[in-house]
Amino acid sequence: MKTLIAGALITAVGFSASVCAQDFDEWLQAAQMGAYAPEQEDWEAVHAAALNELPLQVYMTSSRVNQPIETFSELYPDLVVEGANIPAAEMLERVRRERAAGNYNIGLLHADSPEAYLSMFGDQLVSYVPPEFADVIPENARDPLLVYRYLPTGVTYNPSVYPDEAPVTNIWDLTTEEFRGKVLIADPLQTGSVLTYLTTLVGMEDEMAAAYEARFGAPIQLQEDTAGWEFIRRLLDNDPVIVGGTRDVAESITNSSELLVGFNNFSRMREVPTGRYNFTFVMGLEPFDMVNLPTHLTVMAGNESPNAAKLFVRHLLSDKGGAPWFEDGNPPSRTDWSPSEEWAQPIVEHTKVDVDYQYLLETTDDFIDFWTINR
Amino acid sequence: MNQALQRMRQRLMRPHIIVGLVVLVILSALVIVPVAEILFESFRLQDRDVRRFPGAEAGQWVLFYWERVLASSLSQRIFYGPLINTMIVTVCFTFLAMLLGVALAWLVARTDMPFKALISASVVLPYILPAWTIALAWTTLFRTDSQTLGAAGFLQTMTGMAVPDWVTFGLFPITIVMVINYYAYAFLLTTAALSSMNRQLEEAAMMHGASLWTIIRRVNLPLVLPALVSSFVLTFATGLGAFGVPYLLGLPADVQVMATYLYTSTTLGRYGDAYVLTVILIAMAGITILLTSRLVGLRQSFATMTGKAGSSQLIPLGRYRRVIGIAVVTAVGIPAFLPLGLMALQSLQSGIGNFTWDGFTLDYWIGKNIRGFDGVLVDSRMLKAIWNTFFISFVVGVISVIAAFASGYAVAKGRGSRMATLIEQVAFIPYLVPGVALGAVFLAMFAAPIGPLPSLYGTTTLLILACFVSQLPFAVRSGTTAMMQIAGELEEAGSMHTRSWLTIARRILIPLAKRGLLVAFVLTFISTAKELNLVIMLVTPRTEMLSTVAIGFMDLAMEQFANAIALILVAITLLGALVAKAFSGDRK
């Protein structure tokens, strides 16, 4: 009985420790962020203020977290930034637990699934855009959260097997008899990017219906609620090959001498010039080539190092600080950037759609259930 | 009245009762509280599901998750299917691992078979490796060009022979790889028991003309029963909770076990489902332990380490001795050293897969700036991770030995009592709580100060504490096994000379239990060094461990680094085992 009470107490303490909205507003004011962000930053003053703060703590879902920290320390040898690479699934739960327990150490987050963070932390998330980047980051990439980079995801094939043209021109081709057992999918329940990609497809119901009509010449007959859900069910009925991750998709397509297509992230293309993989993305696909999956860069309100966070965000957005990702197939949200590597050039020409945070929030769980039942 | 109180006082003041009570209090705080929270949470509406119930609030009591898991259109896929697979794997795996481990232990400890050191090393080696490495080596060896990846494995490349699909992926390879990975439990525990057994018992049987088989069946077997039970429970529970191997070898064939689905639900943020599955896993293992402890509780005590000296006569295997030795070395050596060799090769290659002389490079070990990273032996962050891993594992090992001794003593001396059973059961629970869930609960418990305790967030202390709790099952099991064999008369003899129980413990009990305690240290040290799911919730920039660094490299498809780190882990664990041997003064 005592232990039960102890358990209940701990849970209760966790829930009661959250700080109210007014405190965050005060913090924003002191840190000069959010609504209080100045038109121009005096970076020397920011630097001076940062010297009196605790070391900035950064969580990233990327294992390259230490590379920008190293280049940052060349610029500011007197500032300490501490970075940890935490897998996406753990990070959200971990930050939730930390903040529920009244721990506000974490200063900066770089993670995917912006919608999940928005719904969980709301006004504790700060989108900070340094003034020098104000003109090159579009509105939808800074509000409500700062999109740092994209993970474009689309349909891939082996260009050695199809040297002249892509084997598909319409996404509904994947549900035809020709592609029975030929579509590779990294299990969306294991691979977050594929989950978001497919859920976004479900949400583009009008576009999907129009693409169907363009492909088959007649309006779609629905058994499911929308053309989006219909696509997922027919895709699953077509015996797709479901594999563990996008790496397996790339590897299978590379090694195959026959018809195979599969969904993948553009960043896997970095292994094409090295000779490890041989695949390319379908260009000119109906209804669009790629879904542009966002990862966000967010200052956490209440932390002890807001000025260091400002300096570090500015560094991450620069060509040098962002190079570990930008040059590796994850283009930034900045409009003034273009890839310097030749293999990454096509990314500029692909048609891309953005995700809808609200829709993802409402639908992802339904998608997971739908997939589980129909698989 | 006064006399009754006096008697009660005396009863309570007996050493094993005091030790037992202390152990029980600590266990309750560290084990029962986290588990209680998981149980509670399985009945509470999680944030992300609020939208399913208009007007509901997060945290409100619901049966939603239990219904989803047990009785919905999803149940077959997320519960009953995985449950059946889990049971098949666990039963087959436990049977094979016990059979092999015990047979080898007997050969090594009780016969004059040659190459014993090599055989012991070969059995323990796969256990030292992180579970995913051997599974990875299995696919490298057996996959065929007709499977999803379209690439031939090592075997097909060399011989042109394509094994059937069920050999590469599915229940069969999961079972076999897990046996390779974990038959060390039965081997280590049984060897320790057999080695410390009084050999006069066997000699007596031999003098009466008993055959070899009769000696095994009538003398050896009953005497190692506590060790057998311990290994059975550890092995069985490992089967229930196994994640890494089914993840790599099951999912490509769409074979889910409970642990992989549990992991899936946590990665999807479906903590409600995960809590329910965790509670069910704990219940399943709890029932198993209850049944075994009842089974063994009926038997009398077999104290075999008595005050009389035993000679070291080994059972002769006769003229087949060398043949048997060579056959055994081959059988256990291949699964132990082949994956290690493949890993070493891979860490020295510039590309992944096809091994060539041209691709040979030391870059991943000592190079500079390979796609932004330095070689594992020169990178400062890596060196810190190596130190953290060693330090944390070592401290956990030491604390675990203390816990092993204390709880083993309490359980062995109070055998059959309610307290002994309770200690065993409680100590075993962490084994069944998935690492991610345990990590999350510890984070919540210790992120803020508790009374006089400061916040442990971001300290190595928190990592040590969490790892210690997750290692308790090994520690308590090994401790119990070691202490069960020490006859009470030795302690009684000691108590005639001194009134201090601590002196008796130091001068008599600890030296006698040395072997078993050493096993406890080695098991906990190794498991902590490999630990991933638990620590990933708790590491901060200052406290990164090797396993958390390695997982990042796997994500980046830089397997050379991951393989190099796995080899460093092997080196660290071997070092830990050697240090333990040196400390214990064991010359064998």
Image (cartoon, coloured by chain):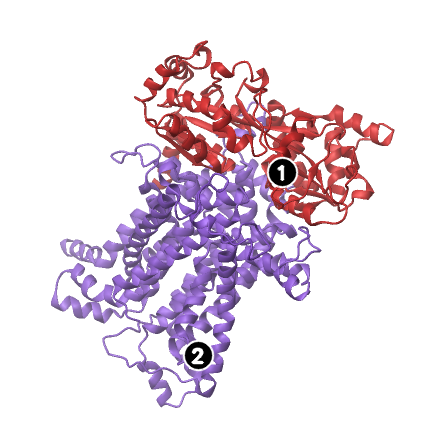
Which quadrant does the N terminus of chain A fall into?
top left
Residue A328 drawn above or below residue B567: above
Identify the chain drawn in purple.
B
Q: Amino acid at mark 1?
A: Met
Give the numbered dot on residue B150: none
The front one of B44 and A166 is A166
**Residue name at image x 48 percent, y 77 percent:** B326
| Identity, as a three-letter code, of the amino acid under mark 2 | Arg
User: Closest to the observer: B41 or A83?
Assistant: A83
Tag 1 secondary structure? helix
> How would you rate the neighbour count of disc 1 (Cα within 10 Å): few for under 14, some for 14-19, many for 20 or more?
many
Q: Chain of mark 1?
A: A
Q: Which chain is red?
A: A
Determine which residue is flagged by label 2. B217
**Residue B516: horizontal and vertical position, in percent?**
32, 64
Q: Is residue B414 shown left or right of residue B339?
A: left
Q: Horizontal placement of A322 versus B152: left or right?
A: left
Do callouts 2 and 1 point to residues on the same chain?
no
Q: Where residue A39 sits in the image (x, y, percent)?
A: 46, 9
The answer, for residue B291, to whether it is visible in the render is no
Percent coordinates x, y for residue B218 in the rendering: 41, 80
Residue on which the image places disc 1? A269
Instruction: Reply above or below: B104 against A189.
Output: below
The residue located at (26%, 64%) in the rendering is B584
Q: Tell whether A227 sits left or right of A140.
A: right
Give the CA distance from mark 2 to mark 1: 62 Å
